[in-house]
Image (spheres, rainbow, N blue to C red):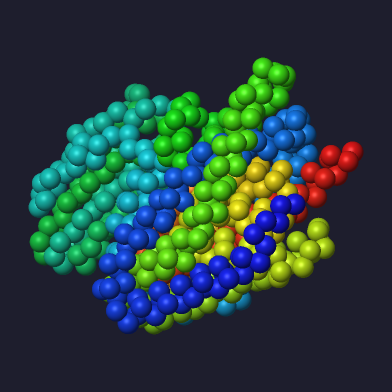
Amino acid sequence: MSKKKKGGHGNLTLYIVGAIVAAIVLSLAAPHVATSLEVGGEIFLRLLQMVVVPLVMASVMSGILGLGDVRKLGRPGGYAVLYYLCTTMLAVVTGLIVVNVISPGYKVPQKLVEDAREEGAAAVEEAKNALTKETRIITWSRLFGSDQLTLNSKTSSSVSNAISVPAGQELVVLVTIDQSGVATTPAKVTVEGWSEGEDFHAITWEDSEGNEKTELVAEKEPETYTFVVPIPEEIKKVRLNYEAQEGGASSTVRAEVIRGSPTIYDIFKNLLLMLFTSNLLESMVEMNLLPIIIFSIVFAGMLTTMGKRSEPIANLVVAINDALMSFILLLMNLAPLGIFCLVAARFGKAQLEGQFLELIQVQFYYMITVLAGLGIHAMVTLPLMLWIFTRRNPYRFMLQMSQAVLTAFSTASSTATLPVTMECAEVNAGVSKRSTEFVLPLGATINMDGTALYEAAAAIFIAQAYSLIRPDFDLTLEQQFTIAITATLAAIGAAGIPEAGLVTMLIVLNAVGLPLELIGLILPVDWLLDRFRTAVNAFGDSVGAAIIDGSFDKEEAG
Ligand code: ASP
């Protein structure tokens, strides 16, 4: 359609590539100078983010007003969701194949796996909090403050206060034994439950190998040990019975009652809830685009039924949309500078923290695995899909979308990149307005091929590494299947912000019973891999918009 500014985008792409290369060189040579550019990057990022919410509202509404009838969205809308789901699954399968072939987890030094567990514990807390705060996918709500079940008597054995357990929910007791000094006999904890007509008695459960257990036993080395004990349905109250360690210093026991691990049903339910909001303004503030898209569809749909009366609003919406698109065009002139600052600051920080060395030394195979998977998806799978459905030259299309892909790489946020993706798709790649205005905002929120691929590959990588320290742990085909499903759902639910995939990773690990702290293994390289997967996310969205474009045409013709 609109081919204004043709020819200009080639140069801009070159400037952006130059900016990224120069920024990386600067960050390696003078990391202190590079990090001082942070403010420039932040300004560019904020300018992009500033337009996201109004742009999504105006573009979705103007798309529907252009169609004239919200029902015309039905078929392309359905195709869009179907396409996004299929490519996400293809990405997951690619991730699984690559990680099983390269097997990076078996190449990690065992010591590193143990260290990563410790480093990961803090990250898990942070990530869980983020999940709880965002109410995305699943919440790990704390039902009781941990202090209620804390035993402060560090050296003598004792029994804690009892607390009541709410009925009708699947709950677990999460026990942490924090041990200092080497023990001769380790601390032990029994979780005791009380039910009608019975006294307090030790709760028994089955471990992953099917052995019946009643006691949580720490080890002799000073460390933090965590255990999870499921609470049987009939239990109304729980308390802890603690046998102190002997020898060495002391250990402190903390415990809390929390919800058990989410089922696939919980994940689905929360995904569905993510579509709706009780407070539109809150969604705008938090840049939760899904409910905003739903609202815009409904609102514009209503406008199309109001005849002449809605004309002033309809004209206003279209004018706002055009103004915002012009603003983005202007903003793109700043892109080389903004991207230079963004990349220099982040890579400079990594250089100062010694993360580059870490990348090369220990996580080399893991990085190669994820990058190979992303490369196959972006260079083979998506181009093939584009060619099959549209007969477009996929590599030319990639070039046309290059500014969006590079912006995604630099910002690590597909939401912040959305304005650029829309601009590129419409102006450079000639995808019709009807498609970009609706399909791209939807894609930026639910379609994350790169993230899904990474979640699947990372989960298997962690499982492989875990089996080095727990040789009895064996990843079955069934578990790989669970990983595939949860990685797809987790990617749909992930926010389009930096390192959101790391947060939703917990859901995948949880689903197959891997220790969450092992995200410590992928933490040091996540900031870099995030950029590549975000670039693939944005590219996947735009391929979707080009393919779905065809279904709008047929619709119109029919
Ligand atoms: N940063 C990614 C995005 O914005 C999400 C992720 O962490 O994978 O698309």
Q: In the rendered image of this protein, does residue 536 appear above or below residue 53?
A: below
Residue 425 x/y as whole percent: 66, 55
In what quadrant of the picture does the C terminus appear? top right
Q: In the rendered image of this protein, does residue 491 appear above or below residue 351?
A: above
Q: In the rendered image of this protein, does residue 174 appear above or below residue 410?
A: above
Q: Name the residue at 84% across, 39% down.
A: 556
Residue furthest right in the image? 558
Q: Quadrant of residue 132?
A: top left
Q: Is residue 429 left or right of residue 145?
A: right
**Residue 83 shows in the view:** no
Count of numbered labels shown in the rendering: 0
Q: Quadrant of residue 61?
A: top right
Q: Name the residue at 62% across, 57% down.
A: 424
Q: Quadrant of residue 178?
A: bottom left
Q: Is residue 418 left or right of residue 219?
A: right
Q: Name the residue at 46% across, 77% down.
A: 21
Q: Name the residue at 35% across, 24% down.
A: 196
Depth check, front residue: 429 or 78: 429
Residue 105 x/y as whole percent: 48, 74
Q: Is residue 208 left or right of residue 219?
A: right
Depth check, front residue: 68 or 176: 68
Depth check, front residue: 305 or 442: 305
Depth check, front residue: 206 or 351: 351
Residue 281 x/y as whole percent: 44, 30
**Residue 314 shows in the view:** yes
Residue 34 x/y as whole percent: 31, 72
